Amino acid sequence: MGRVISSLSELSSLVIRSLALILVFNLSLSVNAEPLKVGEIAPNFTINQIDNAPFKLSEFKGKQSVYLVFWNTWCGHCMKKVPQLMAIEREFGDQVKLLAINTSWSDSLADISQFQARFEANYAIAFDENADITHRYGVMGTPTGFLIDINGVIKQVDGITHTLAANIEQWNRVSDSEEKPVVLAGAVCDKDRLC
């Protein structure tokens, strides 16, 4: 009888520990799990590009827009996006800073080097070693893009390669007011309508 009670005690202890681990895991997933939205101020960050050049988002405020693309080397959609990103860098590189941030999800610097050699990417790439920036921006899948205007405001999430040319002039316009941006519910940014 004592052995059964001991086994039940061990079993209930195991169940409690398992439930605690599940709870901690779920709480960690819920931290900023939702991507940032259009109209929000983009969180500042600093990261070294793979060529060791530092990138600090706040240094672009008042100078030019920034296009962040979160990606992975094994992501098929990310690979399909490379020619578009290369074209953006060629055509708009002086108007928008393009930075491709590898999330580090199942990737390494060696994987990125092979990716660069294969695709001959002409744009800046960074490796988010612990996925800190990736989590701060609420990225849940790749590719995920954020267009941050000259004022530090997120103007578009995803679909940027199709709308950049139509919107770049407005995105590079310094705001006259110091007020927080106002976002209209349901406001959509697309190639036919400025946002």
Image (cartoon, helix red, strand yellow):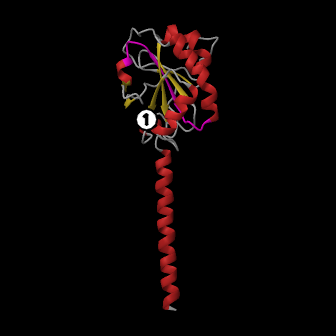
| Residue type highlighted by circle 1 | Ile
Q: Nearer the viewer, residue 117 or 100?
A: 117
Which residue sits at x=46%, y=55%?
Answer: 24
Identify whether 172 is placed above or below 17: above
Which residue sits at x=52%, y=44%?
Answer: 106
Residue 55 at what x, y percent from top left?
A: 37, 25
Q: Nearer the viewer, residue 10 or 46?
A: 46
**Disc 1 element:** helix
Q: Which residues are magenta?
A: 60-75
- Which residue lies under the disc numbered 1? 133
Q: Is residue 91 magenta?
A: no
Q: Is residue 189 left or right of residue 39?
A: right
Which residue sits at x=51%, y=63%?
Answer: 19
Residue 159 visible to an observer of this rendering = no
- View extreme (bottom): residue: 1
Which residue sits at x=59%, y=25%?
Answer: 82
Residue 183 at what x, y percent from top left?
A: 51, 20
Q: How many marks?
A: 1
Q: Is residue 44 left or right of residue 95?
A: left
Question: Which picture quadrant has residue 160?
Answer: top right
Residue 113 visible to an observer of this rendering = yes
